[in-house]
Amino acid sequence: MVDEARQDNVTRDARRAIMIDGIPVSLFGAVALALGSSPDQTTAEKGWWLGVTGAFTLAVVWVLVRAFRRADEYQRKIQLESMAIAFAAVLVGLQIAVLLDATDIVGLRPLSEAIVIGGVGIWFVIADLRTRLHR
């Protein structure tokens, strides 16, 4: 009983740490999406977009490294399986985005940013639900 309570606390603390680390990542993603959605950008706007997108990419890598270092074997398994599902969703979404871009319905760049951000969200939600429902 004591071991289960300790494990629940460890899981709760790990989930809280990932959420706290993920807040700046979400902000960088939202800003990158807003900056990249303008069709006619000046050179300065493109520079800002590239900088924020680079910061977003580095922030995602940073959160991943920290999350995997803190995780035990079971949590790593859940994270990798959740990443695989999210990766498949991103691939399907990007294929749809390419088709929409080819028919000139929607531009590829803003749609691809939203798909990647949505993929990260899918990954976090699936991992969180699997951790919560396992108890």
Image (cartoon, rainbow, N blue to C red):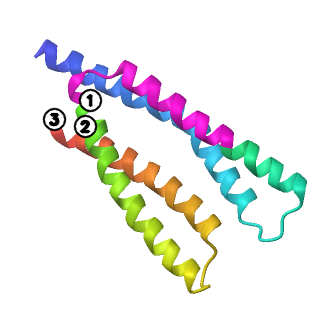
Residue 96 percent location from the top left of the image? 45, 74
- Residue 6 sits above or below residue 104 on the image: above
**Picture residue at 57% right of the left edge, 38% below the top:** 23
Residue segment shown in magenta: 54-75
- Residue 8 sits above or below residue 114 on the image: above
Callout 1: SS:
helix
Q: Which residue matches tag 2?
A: 78
- Residue 83 sits above or below residue 122 on the image: above
The image quarter containing residue 11 is top left
* The one of 129 and 79 positioned closer to us in this rendering: 79
Where residue 75 is drawn, which disc sits there?
A: 1
Q: Is residue 59 magenta?
A: yes
Do residues under tags 1 and 2 come within 8 Å of each other at their CB atoms? yes
Residue 88 percent location from the top left of the image? 33, 57
State the quadrant of the N terminus.
top left
The earlier-in-sequence mark between 2 and 3 is 2
**Picture residue at 23% right of the left edge, 15% below the top:** 6
Q: Is residue 135 magenta?
A: no
Q: Which residue matches tag 3?
A: 135
Amino acid at pointer 2: Ile
Tell me the mark number nearer the camera, choosing from 2 and 3: 2
Residue 34 percent location from the top left of the image? 71, 59
* The one of 132 and 111 positioned closer to us in this rendering: 111
**Picture residue at 30% right of the left edge, 20% below the top:** 10
Amino acid at pointer 1: Gln
Residue 15 percent location from the top left of the image? 38, 31
The residue most toward the front is 102
What is the magenta segment's predominant secondary structure?
A: helix
Characterize the local packing of mark 1: few (<14), some (14-19) or many (20 or more) Cα atoms within 10 angstroms.
some
